[in-house]
Image: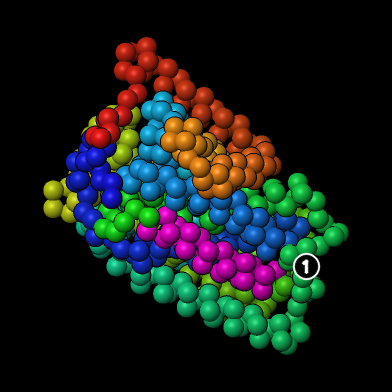
Amino acid sequence: MSTVEQFGYRQELQRSLGFADLMIYGLIFMVPIAPFGIFGNVFAVSHGMVALAYLIGLVAMAFTALSYAQMARAFPMAGSVYTYAGRGIGAPVGFIAGWAILLDYVLVPALLYLVASVAMNSFVPAVPVVGWLVAFVVLNTVVNYLGIQMTARITRIMLAAELAVLAIFLVVGGVALAQGKAQTGALTPLFDSAGFSWSVVLAAASVAVLSFLGFDGISTLAEENREDARRLGRSMLAALAVAAVLFVVQTWVAALLTPGRADLIANGDEAGNAFYDTAEFAGGPWLAALTAVATAVAWGFANSLVAQAATSRLLFAMGRDRMLPSFLAKVHPKHKVPVNATLAVAGISLVLGIFMSTRDNGIGELASLVNFGAMFAFLVLHVSVVVHYLIRKRSGNLLAHLVVPVVGFLVLAAVVINQNVAAQWVGGLWLLLGLVVLGITYLMGRRPELPQEVV
């Protein structure tokens, strides 16, 4: 079994997480009820074929999860794609991959806090959005500061609560369908010839895939995994499979019950209330309130809790290699967490969240940027598998080390091409800035390097 010492590092984080902890962490990061919050947007873009959009998103992420599993076995360290690209291809490529996924990881907590704060403000207007945002950030920072075991315990409780709310919605929705409340044919959420086109479905998948982002966060906990590195990859695949089933089932039921379908497709869901309107149609105001509050708590507390933990581990890994300021690599002597990185994520999330709350479409802008950073990093991940295993190691396993990454790359490329144009522009500028930063380090004589592997 490979260890971090083998790659030139010290074991500083606490190895206390097992397979179940990792899988639950991934599920919480993806949020079992994630479609509640973005259902209307996916519905509009997909012309009602929500289930199909999620299935295509699953295909894209399944190939990516398989590539993650391969690289996690080779390099069982924190840092996710940054580590895998840096070790699998080269340190400069690792920096660019890490820089790209920073756009995902650093923005995700801010996005989650903002969504939750807006939702809570709608229920308790006396507390402004900024007030809720500060409360969520402080609460999660305290929990993460107290150690990864505390985080793991909280995630188990939150997962049970989310699954309970989802079960209630599905039971009530099933009863509503049995009562004849369906607004369309049973297979329409999967395929509707009137609105189908690949560009429509791929564009919707680029939004739906936001719900799947998070399974990759498991890889950032590699140095806190107490079991064989192969368990890390298996936990990613397991979390992704469970989440996919939950996403497809709940969006299928919701899509069948959605009132005002034509208006939603034509005008979109700027207010973000489409799912809650559907819940009210199915079961009454109480179900709308329950699903809305559950979404707010899931995104603002549970999901952002693990997102903050994952982001801090990425900053820790890059700081340890001096790709980012080295103070980010400081580990708390008692709680064994990257304390400075954790506090940095909290500060960035707070500032970004407050700023984006002042914009008319702050949530939509953040969501599109998060997706671009993740998709680009995943593309680099697939290339890393081919370079490391097929070219360097001369692997004979063509299925795992050539077919899977190539197919995964092509599916993701199709999704990226159909992404929001503004996200492509801003994401491209972010990557250009990363190249400039990389160029400056070369001019300063500080070529990116990683500690040598001990043979």
- Residue 366 in percent (x, y) is at 53, 44
Left or right: 146 with respect to 85?
left
Q: Residues within 10 Å of mark 1 (few under 14, many from 20)?
A: many
**Residue positioned 21% across, 54% down in the render:** 14
Residue 314 placement: quadrant: top left
Above or below, comparing residue 296 to residue 347 in the picture: below
Quadrant of the rendered image containing residue 415: top right
Q: Which residue sits furthest left?
A: 333
Residue at image location 59% in from the left, 45% down from the top: 403
- Toward the viewer: 285 or 332? 332
Residue at the image point whose x is 54% and y is 81% from the top = 168
Quarter assignment of residue 372: top right
**Residue 420 seen in this snapshot:** no
| Magenta region, main secondary structure | helix
Task: Tell me if residue 249 is in the magenta stretch.
Answer: yes
Q: Amino acid at mark 1?
A: Thr
User: Which residue position holds label 1?
Assistant: 188
Range of magenta residues: 231-255
Judge whether 391 appears above or below 378 on screen.
above
Q: Which is more toward the observer, 317 or 393? A: 393
Asked if the magenta segment contains residue 163, the reply would be: no
x and y percentages locating residue 213 in the rendered image: 50, 52
Q: Position of residue 207 (x, y in %)?
A: 62, 51
Among all residues in the image, which is located at the extreme front? 396
Q: Residue at x 31, y 56 (%)?
A: 228
Mark 1 falls on what kind of element? loop
